[in-house]
Image (spheres, grey):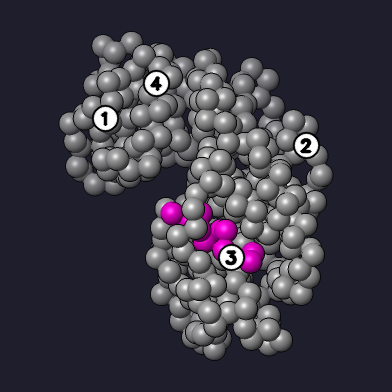
Amino acid sequence: MFSTDKSVLEKDSLAQKRLVEYGTLAEKLFIVVLSKKKNNNQPVAISQNTTVCSAWFWSAWNSGKKFKNQNIDLITSQDPFETGLIGYLAACRLKAKLQLQIHTDFLSPYFIKGSFKNRIRVWLAKFLLPKADSIRVVSQRIKRSLLTIQQFNNITISVLPIFVDVQKIQSAPVTVDLHKKYPQFDFIILMASRLTREKNISLAITAMSKVVKTNSKVGLIIIGDGPEKDGLQLATINSQLSTSIIFELWTDSLASYYKTADAFLNSSNYEGYGRTLIEAASAGCPIITTNVGVVGLARRSLGEGGEAINKDNSLVVPVGDAAALAASMMKLIENKSLRQALSLKVKDAVANLGNKEAYLEKYKQSWQV
């Protein structure tokens, strides 16, 4: 497995624990974490049959040498871009099957316009995907977009979302009450996100500037960190929203936040899935979101290709529409019965998503090509 997630190398991290579980699905699992620096590390066993190491990005394609005597059956790469290219070259060298995973909506126009690098990545993905033996995507949205660019007649495309332990969130005790922590607010909106350009947190700030004109005791709590943080904090000051918008550092223990917030807000330009949306839904937190990732407009069941979050159980607005976002925020603030109805509906929509054993079995099946 080729990955760029550096936290896999950290002992007892959530990512490492997750991959140890994946390791139980195979006789052996070797994980290579790609690095931009020349800091190749020796392989380290993190479980009885799971080994992890890091490799400099531009030499990783040659990592097949390390595993040439291991009888590798499958190479899986966690994106169809640079990591996918490394996986493709390694699969050719080892004569192994190739699985490419897609965790972001790379065919979104917002992804393509994001940078010149992204445009190169789209070209690379279109080159590599037809060469895969199987493709794993994390949402129906990505699968549908893939099928618009070409046919994959002999390639299995499996939809396997990111696992969210719904029952764990629902049973977690409340250790932080946002209303007690921030008593100055009558209504609290929560965001939990990496502070990057594609998350478009500035859209939420613009929407808040409209909302507080008539609702001065509404607060927006933004949990996260990232390269856009300084700019977003400056935008908050310039918009005279310093008392209405509060930034907190990221925490993996968000269950209490979801349970004590009045609404959850997502303003992303694009998402592959949107794990925090499912987490918020698990806690019964009413959702306002742009139409991205796991969000769908159709009121179809999951078995019919529908999405868990849709206009029947959440307030869904067009990407980039600050006026629509503000209007939805106002609608939820002013309508308690709507909040209660959406809370019940969205919680019910994700009730069957948290079976770990069933998820791992589907993950194993995605490797059987």
Name which residue type carries label 4: Thr
| Residue position for label 2 | 301
User: Quadrant location of residue 139?
Assistant: top right
Label for residue 24? 4
How far is the residue under mark 3 from the one under mark 4? Answer: 37 Å
At 55% from the left and 28% from the top, the residue drawn is 359
Q: Decide whether residue 44 is among the magenta residues.
A: no
Q: Nearer the viewer, residue 92 or 73?
A: 73
Amino acid carrying label 1: it is Ile
Q: Mark 3 and mark 1 in contact (Cβ < 8 Å)?
A: no
Number of numbered discs overlaid on the protein picture: 4
Q: Secondary structure at mark 3?
A: loop
Query: In this view of the protein, can residue 197 be seen by the observer?
Result: no
In the rendered image, the vertical position of residue 302 relative to residue 240, given as above or below = above
* Residue sitting at x 63%, y 51%: 281
What label does residue 46 carry, if any? 1
Q: Earlier in the sequence, mark 1 or mark 2?
A: 1
Residue 253 x %, y %: 43, 54
- Label 4: few (<14), some (14–19) or many (≥20) C-alpha neighbours in 10 Å: some
Kindly state the secondary structure of the residue where label 2 is placed.
loop
Q: Nearer the viewer, mark 1 or mark 3?
A: 3
Measured Cα–Cα span from mark 1 to mark 3: 37 Å
Q: Which residues are magenta?
A: 253-263
Q: Amino acid at mark 3?
A: Ala
Within 10 Å of the Cα at label 3, are there few (<14), some (14-19), or many (20+) other Cα atoms? many
Image quadrant holding the N terminus, namely top left
The answer for how far apart the CA atoms under marks 1 and 4 are is 12 Å
Question: Can you give x and y, in whole percent of width and height, for residue 108 in the image?
Answer: 64, 50
Disc 3 from disc 2: Cα separation? 27 Å
Marker disc for residue 261: 3
Q: Secondary structure at mark 1?
A: loop
